[in-house]
Image (cartoon, rainbow, N blue to C red):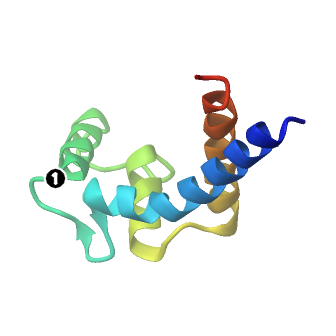
Amino acid sequence: MDPVTAVAGAVGAVGAVAAAPFVVGAAGFTSAGIAAGSWAAGMMSSAAVANGGGVAAGSLVAVLQSAGAAGLSGTASAAVAGVGATVGWLASFIG
C-alpha cells in the first residue's frame, strides 16, 4: 500500500471519530435532549408524525439522540472510524 494512502486512511479514521461527537451535538442531539429549533428537532418532529406521534426505538433519531446523550459506543466508534478511513482513502486519489 502506498504510504500516502495509508496516512490518508488513518487520518480519516481518527478525524471521523474525533469529530463525530461535535457533529452530533451541532445537529442538536445533546446530553440534555434534543435542542429546540435544531435540525434534530426537525428530524424528531418528522419521525413522530410519520410514526403516529412517537419516535420508534432504533430509528435514526433514537440512535443519534443516544449518541448525543451518552457518546458513541465502541461499535459505533468502529463504524465511524471505518467510514472515515474509507473517505480518507478515497480522498487520497484526488489531486
Answer above or below: position of 44 versus 17. Answer: above
80 left or right, relative to 27: right
Picture quadrant where residue 4 is located: top right
Q: Which residue is mark 1?
A: 38
Report x, y in % for residue 48. Answer: 25, 44
Report x, y in % for residue 82. Answer: 70, 46
| Residue at (61, 45) in percent of width and height | 84
Q: Secondary structure at mark 1?
A: loop
Answer above or below: position of 21 versus 31. Answer: above
Q: Nearer the viewer, residue 62 or 86?
A: 86
| Residue at (47, 55) in percent of width and height | 63
Q: Nearer the viewer, residue 47 or 5?
A: 5
Answer above or below: position of 86 versus 27. Answer: above
Furthest residue in direction right, as rendered: 1
State the count of labels.
1
Mark 1 neighbour class, 10 Å CA radius: few under 14, some 14 to 19, many 20 or more: some
Quarter that holds the C terminus: top right
| Residue at (39, 73) in percent of width and height | 69
Answer above or below: position of 85 versus 64. Answer: above
Report x, y in % for residue 77. Answer: 63, 61
Q: Identity of the amino acid at label 1?
A: Ser
23 left or right, relative to 13: left
9 left or right, relative to 47: right
| Residue at (68, 43) in percent of width and height | 8
Picture quadrant where residue 1 is located: top right
Report x, y in % for residue 62. Answer: 42, 55
